[in-house]
Image (cartoon, rainbow, N blue to C red):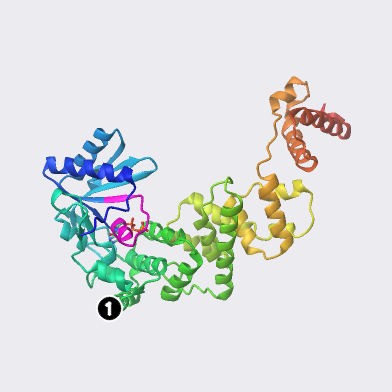
Amino acid sequence: MVNKLKKLPQAFKDILKVASKQASSLGFKIYLVGGVTRDLILGKATFDLDIVVEGDATVLAAKLAQRRGLNFRRHHAFGTAAVYVGEHKIDFATARSEYYPHWGSLPKVAPAQLKEDLFRRDFTINAMAIGLNKADYGKLIDFYGGVADLKKGLIRVLHKESFLEDPTRILRAVRFKQRFSFKIDRDTDKLMRQALKLEALTFLHPHRLSDELILILKEEETYLYIKRLYELTQLSFLKKKMKMDEKDFALLRRIDKAVSFYKRKFKKGKRCESWLIYLGGMVIRLSLEEILNFFRRFGLKKVDIIRVLSMKENLHKIKRLNKKLLPHSIYQLLQPLSIESILFFYAYYPQKKIRDNIEYYLRELAHIRLKVKGEDLKKIDLKPYDLYSRLLQRLLYAKIDKGLKTKRQEIKEAKAIYRRLVRRQPRLL
Ligand code: ATP
């Protein structure tokens, strides 16, 4: 039997050995489970680990963290804990079975053995484990035919009620199917369509829906995922009679390109939450009121709603970039916007002039800040102080247009602007 843990980074292997010994001394059994097992079998690099414990997961995780000097967080309510290894984490959960009081609700849980814990999972390919105990270290445990389905490229649920109990699995099926270019097993597909007919996705709490949808929007080549999801559901769980056509999909594809352009060319640029740009692409043709309704169902956070709404609100203003402009005018238009909105417009408008102006802004202007502060103006005795905000703004625009580099150049320019301001309006003095 090949040791399935071979592909893990050495640091993880060392930690798992320690965890294994500690579990044994506590009389617990532990297993690596879920997506990590799947990815190890597929030969993919994987860095966040999920461990199931037959025993108290929080006790084991605390002991391990203490022994290795690692950060540790416990979630009492769920009986789970996480141990942090650099940027990565190892999640520990007590093996449990689940029971759903209503379809779409959160499940009631009870401690259980590994086999039941794996049975509550979404698909066979995510329901395998690797033993981490002396007797089964590195050995694959596959009760439900996960390996066979991985080989055949099939997404298959473990039981008939699966999609009704937890309709987020419909979204997960689309995600894994697209990510691995798998097929959905025939019976599973039937069950999924039955659940959709019963409008199962509308049973879900908006936050559970958004968590799972955001995962879709964070996949590579996102537009394909949205297209698949639309083909399957028409997104009717977010908006009745939602209409998307080739024009929308073309925009989503251009967003894919805009996001990779930004990642490629602006490696040190602002962090971009690209999933918000796709969301903008999905709703841009709706009215403001429709967008707000859409987001009520989606369960999006207020800050994120504001970011998407700003795409709609600034859509027409951005057309002004379709001509030659002074650098400060480009700055004035784009600086108040989030990087997500800017990239949205880059994708939305095919006009070369608009795109060139946006690229120029990102490359040359976005980082420009004044070196001079109000304090510096006080030192050179420019009065009155309530002139400063206007003065500083003009100074910033002059810096942008004239390419001023040093603080001395800025002070000189500030004096010139000041003289012009008071000459034009002497009563300011
Ligand atoms: P990814 O590679 O995208 O991280 P993953 O399979 O690791 O995918 P997670 O959302 O991290 O997915 O979940 C970890 C594991 O928990 C899954 O592999 C699956 O076994 C289980 N799981 C997650 N969500 C569900 C669900 N809705 N229903 C049943 N089991 C689930």
Along the viewing direction, whichever of 391 and 385 lies nearer the viewer: 391
Residue placed at 24% from the left, 61% from the top? 128
Residue 216 shows in this picture: yes
Q: Residues within 10 Å of mark 1 (few under 14, many from 20)?
A: few
Residue 427: x percent and y percent? 85, 29
Quadrant of ligand 1 in image? bottom left
Q: Residue at x 28, y 47 (%)?
A: 91
Q: Quadrant of the C terminus?
A: top right
Q: Does 137 sit above or below residue 374?
A: below
At 81% across and 32% down in the image, what residue appears?
A: 413
Estimate the x, y position of residue 284 in percent, counting from the top left: 57, 64
Q: Is residue 342 magenta?
A: no
Expressed as whole percent of the image width and height from the top left, the position of residue 21 reads 17, 41
User: In the displayed structure, would residue 280 be above or below residue 20?
Assistant: below
Q: Is the CB–ligand 1 distance for label 1 below 8 Å?
A: no
| Residue 235 is at least partly visible in this image | no
| Residue that extends furthest to the left in the rendered view of this protein | 27
Extreme residue toward the front, this view: 1
Q: Name the foreground residue: 331 vs 87.
A: 87
Position of 274 with respect to 411 (left or right) is left
Q: Quadrant of residue 26?
A: top left
Q: How many marks?
A: 1
Q: Quadrant of residue 261?
A: bottom right
User: Which image quarter: residue 354?
Assistant: bottom right
Against 19, residue 97 (above or below) is below
Residue 145 x, y percent position in the rendering: 22, 69
Residue 361 as seen in the image, left or right of residue 194: right
Report whether 58 appears left or right of 210: left
Instruction: Locate the N terminus by quadrant.
Output: bottom left
What residue type is disc 1 on?
Asp
Q: Label 1: which residue? A: 187
- For the record, the magenta segment spans 35-50
